[in-house]
Image (cartoon, rainbow, N blue to C red):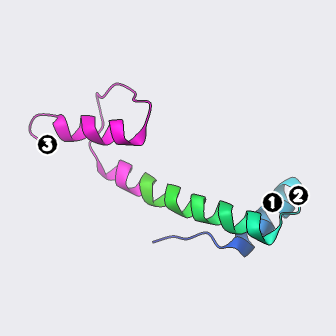
Amino acid sequence: MAEFTPAAVARLARDLFDYEMSADSAASVAKVATTMLADAKVLSALDLDGLEPAFSYPAILAQARLRPGK
C-alpha cells in the first residue's frame, strides 16, 4: 500500500507552500493521507455508477452493498 511519510509531508509543505511543519504535525498529516489513499483504493474498486452522492464514506459503502446484483 502507498504510504506518506512524515518527511515527505514536511517536504511537500515546505516545497509547495513554503510552510514549515512540526514533526508531530507532519506525522499526523501523513497518517491521515495514508488512510485516505487506502479508502480511495477501496472506493475505486466499487461499482458506484448511478449512486446518488452520499455525505459520508459509510453511507457510500452501504449504498453500494445494497445495490441489486452486486
Residue range corresponding to the magenta coloring:
41-70
List the residue tagged with mark 1. 13
Q: Is residue 21 visible?
A: yes
List the residue tagged with mark 2. 19
Q: CA distance from mark 3 to mark 2?
A: 45 Å
Does residue 34 lie above or below 47 as drawn?
below
Q: Among all residues in the image, which is located at the extreme front?
A: 24
| Residue 28 magenta | no
Counting from the top left corner in percent of width and height, residue 65 is at 20, 41
Q: Look at the numbered discs 1 and 3 and tell me whether their residues touch, using CB distance below 8 Å.
A: no
Q: CA distance from mark 1 to mark 2?
A: 5 Å
Q: Residues within 10 Å of mark 2 (few under 14, many from 20)?
A: few
Identified at 44% across, 60% down, the residue is: 38
Secondary structure beneath disc 3? loop
Q: Amino acid at mark 1?
A: Ala
Position of 20 with respect to 3 (left or right) is right
**Circle on res. 55:** none
The disc, 3 or 2, on the residue closer to the chain's N-terminal end is 2
Counting from the top left corner in percent of width and height, residue 8 is at 71, 71
Does residue 43 lie above or below 1 as drawn?
above
Q: Amino acid at mark 3?
A: Lys
Q: Look at the numbered discs 1 and 2 and tell me whether their residues touch, using CB distance below 8 Å.
A: yes
Quadrant holding the C terminus: top left
